[in-house]
Amino acid sequence: MKKTRKLGRKRDQRQALLKGLAANLILKKKIKTSLAKAKEVRSLVEKLVTKARSGNFNSLRYAVKILPAKAVKHLMKEVAPRYADRSGGYTRIVKLGPRRGDGVQVVIIEFV
């Protein structure tokens, strides 16, 4: 069984958070979040882009299960073709420093 970060949330809340972050990353190309959340969403987005590159029906169904329709359309039409010749490493994490309120490491996760 694969270990994942719990992010201080229950399973349903964690899945909803990651789905929302993934959709925003795909639609906006970059988001600002904590390091732990960025590492988790990177894993999800990398899998989505890799599957979407094939462009078959099964990859579409996998994306629809996780993302809203607008994000799926953007993923299939714009994001996946951009990385057709790249075999992974579609995102980068840039550290910005600690947040003033609670000291958590804040990062920007963006597509390469």
Image (tube, rainbow, N blue to C red):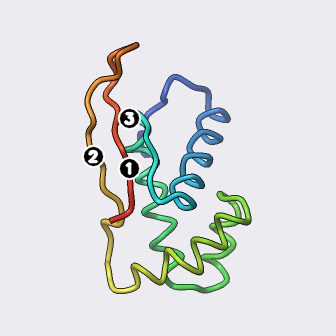
Q: Which residue is drawn at 27% across and 46% down?
A: 94
The residue to which callout 3 is attached is 36
Q: In this view, does 17 lie to the left or right of 25?
A: right
Q: Residue at x 48, y 70 (%)?
A: 49
Dot 1 crowding, Cα within 10 Å, few <14, some 14–19, many 20+: many
User: Residue pushed farthest top?
Assistant: 101
Q: Residue at x 44, y 53 (%)?
A: 30
Answer with mark 1 or mark 2, whichever residue precedes in sequence. 2
In the picture, the disc for residue 94 is 2
Front residue (pair 24, 11): 24
Q: Is residue 106 left or right of residue 51?
A: left
Give the residue type at disc 1: Ile
Please tell me in which quadrant of the rendered image residue 73 appears: bottom right
Answer with mark 3 or mark 2, whichever residue precedes in sequence. 3
Q: Is residue 16 left or right of residue 88?
A: right
Residue 45: percent from the left, percent from the top? Answer: 47, 59
Residue 16: percent from the left, percent from the top? Answer: 65, 41
In the picture, the disc for residue 81 is none
